Amino acid sequence: MTNEEIQRVMEFIIKQQESFAENMGQSESRISRLETAAVSLYNATIELTRSQTELNRAHKALSEKMTELAEAQAHTDLRVNALIDIIDQRRNGEAQS
């Protein structure tokens, strides 16, 4: 090989190396952004899981309170019906006198 041919091969290798180095820099930048996005996604998943757990607890507590309320309402209905019966009986008794 002549000196000129060696010089061209060296220039070609240098350009290839520069291109490779530039591509590596871009790849590192992309990887860094992906890592940041992955961490953000992971943190969001953890927060979503915590929120879901809290929501499940609140839902369970609400269901229990609704059951208690329904039972109290049924008891109140029975007492109101008993009171209505007493009032009706007195009215009927007064009407008959």
Image: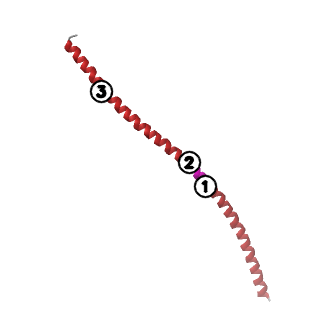
Mark 1 neighbour class, 10 Å CA radius: few under 14, some 14 to 19, many 20 or more? few
Q: Measuring from the top left, give residue 42's x and y in whole percent.
A: 49, 41
In this rendered view, identify the residue nearer to me: 72 or 82: 72
Q: What residue type is labelled 2?
A: Arg
Stretch of the chain drawn in magenta: 53-58
Horizontally, is 19 left or right of 3 in the view? right
As drawn, which residue projects farthest toward the top?
1
Mark number displayed over residue 59: 1
Question: Vertical placement of 73 versus 87: above or below?
Answer: above
Mark number displayed over residue 29: none
Helix or strand or loop: what does disc 1 sit on? helix
Q: What residue type is labelled 3?
A: Ser
Q: What residue type is labelled 1?
A: His
Q: Mark 3 points at which residue?
A: 19
Asked whether 54 falls inside the magenta stretch, the response is: yes
Q: Name the residue under label 2.
A: 50
The residue sitting at 67% across, 60% down in the picture is 67
Q: Which of marks 1 and 2 is nearer the N terminus?
A: 2
Q: How far apart are marks 2 and 3 (CA)?
A: 47 Å
